[in-house]
């Protein structure tokens, strides 16, 4: 065990170490894991929670860190919030050995929030399988676990929602039926997840449903419908999305701008550029991101990009 790791483990026994010291828990060697696990189990619950929350925050901000071993150690922690943060912390980990662990959490964990986090986490493995980037076995394991959760009687609506959203990547007929059933659900939360799932499912059959929900009185539904329009590249939504750039809800505005960037075309580009020139910071940030997407998806923005310094925000951060 290296000196830095030994030092932080000693600190952990008495207090929460300073944030910079926690970086020494990144990239743990295999031979260190057993000792870390042994000490971790002796720490007070509140300290384990503080540490795992902080590690998850660091991992989201600094892509060079790798706290994967710490998150794995915490998947069976007695504290449910530690388990949930551990699942969330693994959001970019594509190791297929996680699939059975997440499937077990989804099926057996006593706490709905942990089951819901596991359902969300399994979604990336389903997508990887649909893209042919992982072997069929873990892909099928993820699908089966999510299907059971979607169909489980007595399961909470939050778990049902997250399982539906994750399984929506699949083109199976069963999934189409699940989305249709969710859209007919009496609970609007389930219908909102159904629209989210329609976008992920990437099937043109959902176009009429998504277009209709652009006019919902619920801003959360309008947000998901706008986002789904972008994922489905629904050109018929263009004029409505342009109107939604001035929606009363800022998050809906962002979703509309993002969707315009996905759909593309001269009219969409003109609106996005106007937002990028405007004084509204939320719209301006969303528009700059959308312009990058336009360039990536549709190419050759040419001189139209010249008025905007797409890296201006990054340069400012560097100066700070």
Image (cartoon, grey):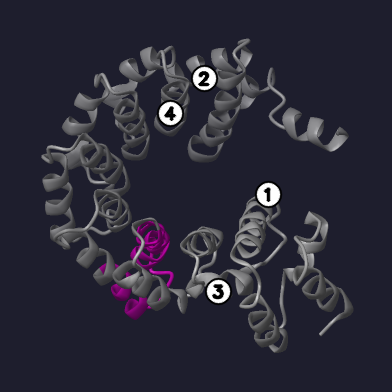
Sequence-wise, the earlier of marks 3 and 4 is 3
Circle 1 Cα neighbour tier, 10 Å, few/some/many (<14 / 14–19 / ≥20): few
How far from the left and from the top, in percent, is residue 133?
43, 69
Q: CA distance from mark 3 to mark 2?
A: 42 Å
Query: Given contact means CB atoms under 8 Å apart, are the residues at marks 1 and 3 in contact?
Result: no
Residue 132 seen? yes
Sequence-wise, the earlier of marks 3 and 2 is 3
Query: Given contact means CB atoms under 8 Å apart, are the residues at marks 3 and 4 in contact?
Result: no
Quadrant for the C terminus in the image = top right
Q: Nearer the viewer, mark 2 or mark 4?
A: 4
Range of the magenta residues? 114-143
Residue 81 counted in the magenta span: no
How far from the left and from the top, in percent, is residue 77?
51, 72
Q: Disc 4 marks which residue?
A: 255
The disc at residue 272 is 2
The disc at residue 72 is 3
Task: Determine the image quadrant of residue 239.
Answer: top left
Q: CA distance from mark 1 to mark 4?
A: 23 Å
Sequence-wise, the earlier of marks 1 and 2 is 1
Sequence-wise, the earlier of marks 1 and 3 is 1
Q: Disc 1 marks which residue?
A: 61
How far from the left and from the top, in percent, is residue 278?
61, 11
Is 122 rendered above or below residue 77?
above
């Amino acid at each position: 065990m290296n000196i830095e790791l030994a030092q932080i483990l000693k600190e952990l026994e008495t207090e929460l170490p300073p944030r910079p010291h926690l970086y020494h828990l990144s990239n743990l060697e295999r031979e260190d894991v057993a000792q870390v696990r042994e000490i971790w189990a002796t720490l007070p619950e509140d300290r384990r929670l503080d540490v795992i929350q902080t590690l998850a925050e660091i991992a989201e901000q600094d892509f060079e860190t790798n706290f994967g071993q710490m998150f794995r150690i915490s998947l069976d922690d007695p504290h449910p919030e530690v388990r949930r943060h551990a699942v969330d912390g693994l959001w970019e980990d594509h190791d297929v050995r996680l699939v059975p662990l997440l499937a077990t959490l989804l099926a057996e964990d006593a706490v709905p929030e942990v089951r819901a986090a596991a359902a969300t986490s399994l979604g990336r493995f389903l997508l990887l399988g649909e893209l042919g980037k992982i072997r069929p076995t873990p892909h099928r394991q993820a699908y089966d676990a999510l299907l059971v959760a979607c169909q489980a009687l007595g399961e909470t609506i939050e778990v049902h929602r997250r399982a539906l959203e994750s399984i929506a990547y699949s083109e199976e007929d069963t999934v189409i039926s699940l989305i249709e059933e969710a859209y007919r659900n009496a609970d609007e939360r389930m219908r909102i997840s159904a629209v989210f799932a329609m976008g992920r499912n990437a099937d043109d059959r959902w176009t009429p449903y998504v277009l209709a929900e652009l006019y919902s009185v619920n801003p959360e539904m309008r947000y998901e419908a706008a986002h789904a329009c972008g994922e489905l590249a629904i050109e018929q939504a263009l004029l409505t999305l342009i109107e939604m750039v001035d929606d009363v809800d800022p998050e809906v505005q962002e979703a509309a701008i993002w969707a315009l960037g996905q759909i593309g075309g001269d009219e969409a580009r003109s609106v996005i550029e106007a937002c990028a020139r405007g004084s509204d910071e939320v719209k301006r940030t969303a528009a700059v991101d959308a312009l990058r997407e336009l360039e990536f998806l549709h190419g050759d923005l040419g001189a139209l990009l010249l008025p905007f310094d797409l890296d201006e925000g990054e340069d400012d951060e560097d100066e700070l």
